[in-house]
Image: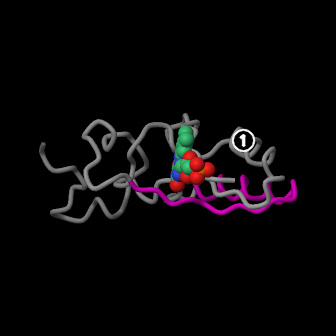
Amino acid sequence: MAPMTRARATNDALAPTPAHALYYAQRAGAGLIITEGTWVSTQAIGASNVPGIYTEPQTAAWAEVTEAVHQAGGESSPNSATPARNPTPTTSAVPGPPDPQRSTPGNSGSPPPV
Ligand SMILES: Cc1cc2nc3c(=O)[nH]c(=O)nc-3n(C[C@H](O)[C@H](O)[C@H](O)COP(=O)(O)O)c2cc1C
């Protein structure tokens, strides 16, 4: 199954939910599922309500999705996602968990002024 963004991670942790596990398990018959694109850091966020895979709660939630797919007889692989070089200030300001990379002095993680 080709990756398809669903924007259903409507939680502050930007973690996949039981609805994600159900959605992918229902499609296990596809054989190999490539998941929707999932952000690899807070700096990679490029759209609202798309899940990430850069915190422990997120990876734990993705493990539950994977287990649901396996239980249904399928296989899945995450689709790593980053926006293009210049996410808009609006989308890059989507709140998420703290990112240690952003605490580096001189690297606020903020997008350049436009
Ligand atoms: C609504 C929608 C969401 C998509 N989301 C993703 C995505 O998250 N990651 C990705 O790599 N491709 C994404 N795609 C691209 C599809 O996986 C696929 O490559 C594209 O639709 C072309 O499919 P086709 O070769 O069967 O025509 C998305 C496509 C659509 C229509």
Quarter of the rendering containing residue 109:
bottom left
Q: Does the magenta stretch include residue 78?
A: yes
Q: Residue 90, position in %: x, y?
A: 29, 36
Q: Which of 40 and 61 is in front in this view?
A: 40
Asked if residue 63 lies left or right of residue 53, the reply is: right
Residue in the image at 77% along x and 42% along y: 22
Q: Does the magenta stretch include residue 53?
A: no
Residue projecting furthest to the left = 113
Return the residue at label 1. 18
Q: Residue 103, position in %: x, y?
A: 27, 60
Q: In which quarter of the image is the C terminus?
A: top left
Q: Residue 24, position in %: x, y?
A: 74, 47
Q: Residue 83, position in %: x, y?
A: 37, 52
Residue in the image at 38% along x and 45% along y: 46
Label 1 residue near ligand 1, CB within 8 Å = no
Residue type indicated by callout 1:
Pro
Disc 1 secondary structure class: helix
- Count of labels in the image: 1
Is residue 37 in view from this perspective? Answer: no
Region in magenta:
58-82
Q: Nearer the viewer, residue 47 or 31?
A: 31
Asked if residue 108 lies left or right of residue 83, the reply is: left
Quarter of the rendering containing residue 72:
bottom right
User: Relative to 37, is 9 above or below?
Assistant: above
- Mark 1: few, some, or many residues within 10 Å (few <14, many ≥20)? some
Quarter of the rendering containing residue 33:
bottom right
Is residue 32 in view from this perspective? Answer: yes
